[in-house]
Image (spheres, helix red, strand yellow):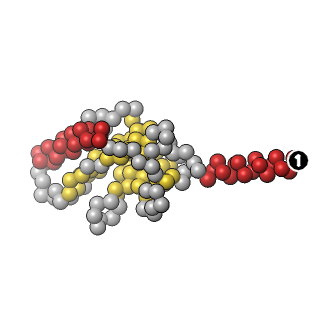
Amino acid sequence: MRNFALAVLSVLAVASCSHPSPPQGRWEGHYESDDAMIVARLEIGADGKVRVSAPDLLDIAGASDEDRQAMRQRLAEDLAQGWDEVAPRAMDFDGGVFRKPGGVAPQAIWDAKSRTMQLVVYLGARSALNIPMRAVGDFSDNPWSK
C-alpha cells in the first residue's frame, strides 16, 4: 500500500510540473531605434489568458526629434485607446516561454528567478525583438516616461 501511495504522489508531482502556471500581472514597455518605435502592454489573468498589444511605427529613420516626440505620443495614445478592444488569448506556457497554441515561435519570455518579462515582437522580415517589460500595478498613459 505504501508503494502505491508513493506511486500516486510521484504521478501527481510530475503532472503538476508538466503544466506550470503562468505569472499573473501587468507589464508595459517600449522599444526605440533609428528606424522603429514600439510601445507594448501585456496582461496575464488568473485564468492564464494573455492580452497583448504592441503598436509600432517603422521606417522612421529620417524623423526629427520633434517628429519623434509626436510619434511617441501617438503610439502611447493608440495603445491606451485600443486596449479595451484587445481580447484575451490562450497561450502555451512551459514555465518560461509563452507560445501560440501549438506554435514554435516565442511570444513572451518569463524569468521566474528574476521575475522579469520580455515581449518578443516580430516585424516582418526583421529579426525578432525582445522588449524588456516592467511590472506595473496599473497601466500608464505614457509608457515612454518610465
Q: Which residue is located at x 48 percent, y 60 percent?
A: 102
Q: Is residue 85 above or below residue 108?
A: above
- Residue 99, given in percent of the width and then of the height, sits at 45, 56
Which residue occupies the foreground of this view, 112 or 101?
Answer: 101
Q: Which residue is located at x 29 percent, y 41 percent?
A: 85
Which amino acid type is marked by label 1? Met
Q: Secondary structure at mark 1?
A: loop
Using a 10 Å C-alpha cutoff, classify the residue at mark 1 as few (fewer than 14 neighbours), some (14 to 19) or many (20 or more): few
Most extreme residue toward the bottom is 125
Judge left or right: residue 141 versus residue 6. left
Judge left or right: residue 49 versus residue 146. right
- Residue 22, given in percent of the width and then of the height, sits at 51, 45
Residue highlighted by disc 1? 1
- Residue 82, given in percent of the width and then of the height, sits at 25, 41
Q: Is residue 34 visible?
A: no
- Count all numbered tags in the image, as a single digit: 1
Which residue occupies the foreground of this view, 3 or 140?
Answer: 3
Judge left or right: residue 106 versus residue 144. right
Q: Give the quadrant of residue 144.
A: top left
Most extreme residue toward the right is 1
Which residue occupies the foreground of this view, 54 or 51?
Answer: 51
Q: Give the quadrant of residue 94.
A: bottom right
Quadrant housing the C terminus: top left
Q: Which residue is located at x 16 percent, y 56 percent?
A: 60
Q: Which residue is located at x 12 percent, y 47 percent?
A: 67
Judge left or right: residue 63 versus residue 33. left
Q: Is residue 85 visible?
A: yes
